[in-house]
Image: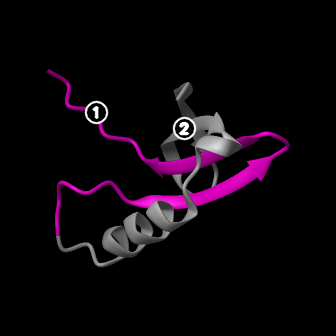
């Protein structure tokens, strides 16, 4: 699976991570479970997924940007 992650600015969210991957590598069921887990905000170690959109053969997932600043 080839994918890339970019730091982007979206007006409604601010700075977020955008993961770009091939549509064939995107698992809708996995996305739904991850999205549901993140919506509960119960675990600070689970990234919050904001959206997933398909553009041609690519899927773009927007999620919280996690910068450890190590």
Which residue is located at x 40 percent, y 70 percent?
Answer: 33
User: Toward the viewer: 33 or 50?
Assistant: 33
Which residue is located at x 34 percent, y 68 percent?
Answer: 38
Q: N-terminal of the two: label 2 or label 1?
A: 2
**Labelled disc at residue 21:** none
Q: Is residue 11 left or right of residue 31?
A: right
Would you identify the image quadrant in which residue 69 lies?
top left
Q: Quadrant of the C terminus?
A: top left
Span highlighted in magenta in the image: 43-70
Q: Is residue 32 left or right of residue 37?
A: right
Disc 1 target residue: 67
User: Toward the viewer: 70 or 32?
Assistant: 32
Q: Are marks 2 and 1 in contact (CB under 8 Å)?
A: no
User: Toward the viewer: 15 or 33?
Assistant: 33
Measured from the top left, where is residue 24 in percent x and y? 67, 43
- Disc 1 is placed on an element classified as loop
Magenta segment includes 15? no
- Disc 2 is placed on an element classified as strand
**Labelled disc at residue 19:** 2
């Amino acid at each position: 699976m080839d994918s890339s992650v970019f730091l982007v600015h979206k007006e409604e969210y601010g700075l977020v991570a955008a993961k770009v991957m091939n549509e064939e590598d995107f698992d809708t069921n996995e996305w739904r479970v991850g999205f549901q887990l993140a919506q509960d905000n119960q675990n600070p170690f689970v990234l919050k997924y904001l959206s997933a959109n398909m553009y041609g053969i690519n899927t773009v997932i927007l999620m919280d940007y996690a910068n450890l600043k190590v």
